[in-house]
Amino acid sequence: NDFISNSFILNTCDSTNTYLKNISMKNSTAEGTIVVANSQSNGKGRQGRLFYSPENVGLYFSILLKPFKIDLITSFIATSVATAIDKLYNVNTQIKWVNDIYLNGKKICGILTEGQIEIESQSPSFLIIGIGINVNNISINKELSNIATSLFIETKKSINRLELLSEIINNISYYANKISKGDFISIYRKKMFLVNSKIKFTRNNKILIGKVLGVDDDCSLIIETDNNEIINLNSGEVHIISV
């Protein structure tokens, strides 16, 4: 794929995000640099959580992007991953805002975006997108089995991880060239399953409850709070209370 400028294929590492961040800080690393690992000893999830990354079964990779339309980055990546899975395996994935991919009601993929901040401008000089997908796992950790699944569990088919990686990269390349037009947002809206759900979330260090009305053009969540205030939430985590 022409979008990939450089690639590092590893048997194992602590985290593909950490590995890519380290080489990016030491060298002038080009956009489209990708790190793929067969396993991770300290895979990163959101909010400092660990992403369980056993060998030979998952797809774990990170890609370096220039910081464009930052508000849209995670949602365009989520759309790229979800549509790749749908196309290859004839399934219907859903997206939990902002960027968790679900299949049949359980999480199948996590995405983590990290940036390197330039001191003078206080803006990111590059963004590293980490993607972890449960692919050929025949089972899920007991403590996660009620909320997570894998492509193999759901499709009963052994998945070619390289084929899946290639399709995702093709989608990222395609949508990256069109991100200014927001071509992916209509797909993101259709796949985002929180609409009309009641959720709990944190804003300005306050815990609030509200109903999800939809997704704005910058992929922020439009919420009507219990106080009848309409707000836009552009980052953070949400917890579903009822659907």
Image (cartoon, helix red, strand yellow):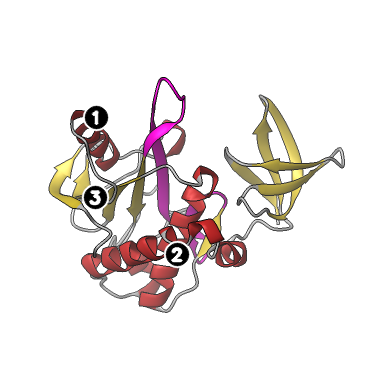
Residue type highlighted by circle 1? Met
Give, as a three-letter code, the residue at label 3: Ile
Q: CA distance from mark 1 to mark 2?
A: 30 Å
Q: Does 54 appear in magenta?
A: no
Mark closer to the observer (3, 1): 1
Q: Using the image as rendered, state which of residue 143 and residue 211 is in the foreground.
A: 211
Residue 8: x and y in percent read 15, 48
| Residue 144 in view of the camera | no
Q: Position of residue 86 (x, y in %)?
A: 43, 73
Q: Is residue 211 above or below residue 227?
A: below
Residue displayed at 49% across by 58% down? 179
C-alpha gap between disc 3 and disc 1: 15 Å
Q: Looking at the picture, how far across and down is residue 129, in whole percent?
A: 36, 45
Q: Residue 3's image quarter? A: bottom left
Give the percent coordinates (x, y) of residue 117.
40, 27
Q: Residues within 10 Å of mark 1 (few under 14, many from 20)?
A: few
Tag 3 near tag 2, CB within 8 Å: no
Q: At numbered mark 1, what does the secondary structure look like: helix, strand or loop?
A: helix
